[in-house]
Image (cartoon, rainbow, N blue to C red):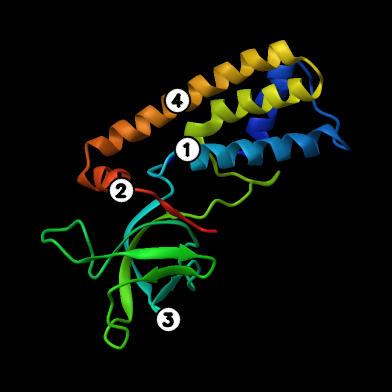
Protein backbone atom coordinates (compact mmCIF):
# COMPACT_ATOMS: atom_id res chain seq x y z
CA UNK A 1 0.00 0.00 0.00
CA UNK A 2 1.16 3.50 -0.76
CA UNK A 3 2.78 5.56 1.99
CA UNK A 4 4.34 8.97 2.42
CA UNK A 5 7.08 10.18 4.75
CA UNK A 6 6.65 12.52 7.68
CA UNK A 7 9.06 14.88 5.93
CA UNK A 8 6.70 15.05 2.94
CA UNK A 9 3.75 15.72 5.24
CA UNK A 10 5.61 18.48 7.08
CA UNK A 11 6.61 20.07 3.77
CA UNK A 12 2.97 20.08 2.66
CA UNK A 13 1.79 21.69 5.91
CA UNK A 14 4.54 24.31 5.54
CA UNK A 15 3.42 24.98 1.98
CA UNK A 16 -0.18 25.46 3.13
CA UNK A 17 1.09 27.87 5.79
CA UNK A 18 3.17 29.75 3.21
CA UNK A 19 6.45 29.34 5.10
CA UNK A 20 9.77 27.78 4.17
CA UNK A 21 9.99 26.01 7.52
CA UNK A 22 8.52 26.02 11.00
CA UNK A 23 10.52 27.01 14.07
CA UNK A 24 12.31 23.79 15.16
CA UNK A 25 12.36 24.87 18.81
CA UNK A 26 8.61 25.31 19.17
CA UNK A 27 6.34 24.95 16.14
CA UNK A 28 7.71 21.66 14.75
CA UNK A 29 7.09 19.86 18.05
CA UNK A 30 3.50 21.10 18.07
CA UNK A 31 2.99 20.01 14.45
CA UNK A 32 4.11 16.46 15.30
CA UNK A 33 1.65 16.44 18.19
CA UNK A 34 -1.12 17.62 15.84
CA UNK A 35 -0.23 14.89 13.34
CA UNK A 36 -0.48 12.10 15.91
CA UNK A 37 -3.72 13.41 17.37
CA UNK A 38 -5.29 13.67 13.93
CA UNK A 39 -3.86 10.35 12.76
CA UNK A 40 -5.39 8.59 15.74
CA UNK A 41 -8.76 10.19 14.95
CA UNK A 42 -8.52 8.84 11.38
CA UNK A 43 -7.51 5.41 12.70
CA UNK A 44 -10.50 5.41 15.06
CA UNK A 45 -12.95 6.49 12.37
CA UNK A 46 -13.02 3.11 10.60
CA UNK A 47 -12.77 -0.51 11.73
CA UNK A 48 -11.76 -1.78 8.30
CA UNK A 49 -8.86 0.36 7.12
CA UNK A 50 -7.17 -2.20 4.83
CA UNK A 51 -3.68 -1.50 6.16
CA UNK A 52 -4.72 -2.10 9.78
CA UNK A 53 -7.15 -5.03 9.61
CA UNK A 54 -5.86 -8.60 10.11
CA UNK A 55 -8.28 -11.43 9.35
CA UNK A 56 -8.20 -14.79 11.07
CA UNK A 57 -4.71 -14.87 12.59
CA UNK A 58 -3.93 -17.73 14.96
CA UNK A 59 -3.29 -16.47 18.49
CA UNK A 60 -2.31 -18.23 21.71
CA UNK A 61 -4.88 -18.53 24.50
CA UNK A 62 -3.25 -17.78 27.86
CA UNK A 63 -4.26 -18.96 31.31
CA UNK A 64 -7.70 -17.71 32.21
CA UNK A 65 -9.01 -18.04 28.64
CA UNK A 66 -7.41 -14.75 27.63
CA UNK A 67 -6.02 -13.72 24.27
CA UNK A 68 -3.46 -11.00 25.13
CA UNK A 69 -2.89 -7.85 23.09
CA UNK A 70 0.73 -8.75 22.53
CA UNK A 71 2.36 -11.94 21.27
CA UNK A 72 5.96 -12.47 20.20
CA UNK A 73 6.61 -11.96 16.47
CA UNK A 74 3.05 -10.73 15.83
CA UNK A 75 1.39 -7.34 15.58
CA UNK A 76 0.04 -5.81 18.76
CA UNK A 77 -3.75 -5.83 18.78
CA UNK A 78 -5.46 -2.46 19.01
CA UNK A 79 -9.07 -3.64 18.68
CA UNK A 80 -10.56 -7.13 18.77
CA UNK A 81 -13.27 -7.69 16.16
CA UNK A 82 -14.09 -11.39 16.12
CA UNK A 83 -12.67 -14.65 17.51
CA UNK A 84 -13.19 -18.09 15.92
CA UNK A 85 -12.31 -21.65 16.84
CA UNK A 86 -10.65 -22.26 13.46
CA UNK A 87 -9.48 -20.14 10.56
CA UNK A 88 -12.58 -18.25 9.37
CA UNK A 89 -13.84 -16.96 6.03
CA UNK A 90 -12.64 -19.91 3.99
CA UNK A 91 -14.96 -22.65 2.70
CA UNK A 92 -16.96 -23.87 5.67
CA UNK A 93 -18.50 -22.24 8.70
CA UNK A 94 -16.61 -22.29 11.99
CA UNK A 95 -17.64 -21.68 15.57
CA UNK A 96 -17.41 -18.07 16.76
CA UNK A 97 -16.72 -17.24 20.41
CA UNK A 98 -18.29 -14.53 22.50
CA UNK A 99 -15.78 -12.47 24.45
CA UNK A 100 -15.25 -9.36 26.49
CA UNK A 101 -12.23 -7.09 26.67
CA UNK A 102 -10.32 -5.55 29.54
CA UNK A 103 -6.78 -4.27 30.06
CA UNK A 104 -5.27 -7.78 29.79
CA UNK A 105 -6.88 -8.80 26.50
CA UNK A 106 -9.94 -10.64 25.19
CA UNK A 107 -11.58 -13.02 27.67
CA UNK A 108 -13.21 -15.84 25.70
CA UNK A 109 -16.52 -17.29 26.86
CA UNK A 110 -17.82 -20.83 26.30
CA UNK A 111 -14.41 -22.31 25.65
CA UNK A 112 -12.84 -25.53 26.95
CA UNK A 113 -9.66 -24.29 28.68
CA UNK A 114 -7.77 -27.60 28.73
CA UNK A 115 -8.53 -28.42 25.10
CA UNK A 116 -8.06 -25.03 23.43
CA UNK A 117 -4.58 -23.56 23.17
CA UNK A 118 -5.16 -21.22 20.24
CA UNK A 119 -7.93 -19.37 18.44
CA UNK A 120 -8.21 -17.33 15.25
CA UNK A 121 -8.57 -13.59 15.82
CA UNK A 122 -9.73 -10.89 13.43
CA UNK A 123 -8.42 -7.62 14.74
CA UNK A 124 -7.23 -4.11 14.04
CA UNK A 125 -3.52 -3.47 14.50
CA UNK A 126 -2.52 -1.14 17.29
CA UNK A 127 -1.98 2.50 16.37
CA UNK A 128 1.60 3.64 16.94
CA UNK A 129 2.56 7.32 17.08
CA UNK A 130 4.57 8.70 14.17
CA UNK A 131 7.94 10.38 14.58
CA UNK A 132 9.89 12.87 12.49
CA UNK A 133 11.64 9.88 10.91
CA UNK A 134 8.47 7.99 9.97
CA UNK A 135 8.19 6.75 6.41
CA UNK A 136 4.82 5.00 6.78
CA UNK A 137 2.25 7.82 6.79
CA UNK A 138 -0.82 6.27 5.11
CA UNK A 139 -1.36 7.72 1.64
CA UNK A 140 -5.13 7.67 2.22
CA UNK A 141 -4.71 9.97 5.24
CA UNK A 142 -2.16 12.35 3.74
CA UNK A 143 -4.40 15.20 2.59
CA UNK A 144 -6.60 14.91 5.67
CA UNK A 145 -3.58 15.15 7.96
CA UNK A 146 -2.08 18.07 6.04
CA UNK A 147 -5.24 20.20 6.12
CA UNK A 148 -6.30 19.15 9.63
CA UNK A 149 -2.89 19.92 11.13
CA UNK A 150 -2.77 23.22 9.27
CA UNK A 151 -6.19 24.00 10.77
CA UNK A 152 -4.77 23.24 14.21
CA UNK A 153 -1.83 25.53 13.50
CA UNK A 154 -4.16 28.34 12.42
CA UNK A 155 -6.28 27.84 15.53
CA UNK A 156 -3.16 28.03 17.69
CA UNK A 157 -2.30 31.28 15.93
CA UNK A 158 -5.75 32.72 16.60
CA UNK A 159 -6.91 32.55 12.96
CA UNK A 160 -10.24 30.90 13.77
CA UNK A 161 -12.11 31.62 10.53
CA UNK A 162 -9.31 30.30 8.35
CA UNK A 163 -9.00 27.29 10.67
CA UNK A 164 -12.68 26.44 10.15
CA UNK A 165 -12.20 26.52 6.37
CA UNK A 166 -9.24 24.13 6.56
CA UNK A 167 -11.13 21.91 9.01
CA UNK A 168 -13.94 21.56 6.48
CA UNK A 169 -11.47 20.65 3.73
CA UNK A 170 -9.81 18.09 6.02
CA UNK A 171 -13.14 16.42 6.83
CA UNK A 172 -13.97 16.16 3.13
CA UNK A 173 -10.67 14.41 2.43
CA UNK A 174 -11.24 12.01 5.33
CA UNK A 175 -14.80 11.24 4.23
CA UNK A 176 -13.56 10.51 0.72
CA UNK A 177 -10.98 8.04 2.08
CA UNK A 178 -13.56 6.46 4.40
CA UNK A 179 -16.00 5.97 1.54
CA UNK A 180 -13.30 4.28 -0.52
CA UNK A 181 -12.39 1.93 2.32
CA UNK A 182 -16.01 1.06 3.05
CA UNK A 183 -16.87 0.62 -0.62
CA UNK A 184 -13.97 -1.78 -1.05
CA UNK A 185 -15.05 -3.80 1.96
CA UNK A 186 -18.71 -3.81 0.90
CA UNK A 187 -17.58 -6.06 -1.94
CA UNK A 188 -16.10 -8.60 0.45
CA UNK A 189 -17.94 -10.85 2.86
CA UNK A 190 -15.20 -10.24 5.42
CA UNK A 191 -15.76 -6.49 5.45
CA UNK A 192 -19.51 -6.86 5.89
CA UNK A 193 -19.13 -9.30 8.74
CA UNK A 194 -16.66 -7.14 10.63
CA UNK A 195 -18.70 -3.97 10.33
CA UNK A 196 -22.06 -5.51 11.19
CA UNK A 197 -20.88 -7.54 14.16
CA UNK A 198 -21.62 -4.83 16.70
CA UNK A 199 -19.48 -2.77 19.02
CA UNK A 200 -15.81 -3.09 18.22
CA UNK A 201 -13.77 -4.25 21.18
CA UNK A 202 -10.95 -1.77 21.80
CA UNK A 203 -7.92 -1.96 24.02
CA UNK A 204 -8.69 -0.18 27.28
Q: Earlier in the sequence, mark 3 or mark 4?
A: 3
Given residues 114 and 149, the one toward you in this image is: 114
Residue located 43% across and 39% down the image: 46
Residue of label 1:
45
Report crowding for label 3: few under 14, some 14 to 19, many 20 or more residues within 10 A (C-alpha): few
Residue of label 3:
64
CA gap between label 3 and label 1 equals 32 Å
What is the x, y in percent for residue 127? 55, 51
Residue of label 4:
175
Q: Earlier in the sequence, mark 1 or mark 2?
A: 1
Residue 6 at least partly seen:
no
- Proximity of marks 3 and 1: CB atoms separated by less than 8 Å: no
- Proximity of marks 4 and 2: CB atoms separated by less than 8 Å: no
Q: Earlier in the sequence, mark 4 or mark 2?
A: 4
Residue located 51% across and 42% down the image: 43
Q: Residue furthest right?
A: 25
**Quarter where residue 57 is shown:** bottom left
Amino acid sequence: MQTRTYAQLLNTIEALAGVDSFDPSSEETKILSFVNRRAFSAYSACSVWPRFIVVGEERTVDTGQVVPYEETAKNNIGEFNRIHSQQPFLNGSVYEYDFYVDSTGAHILNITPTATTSVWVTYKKEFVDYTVDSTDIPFEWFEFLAHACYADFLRMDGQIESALYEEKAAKEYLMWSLEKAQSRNNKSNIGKRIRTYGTTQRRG
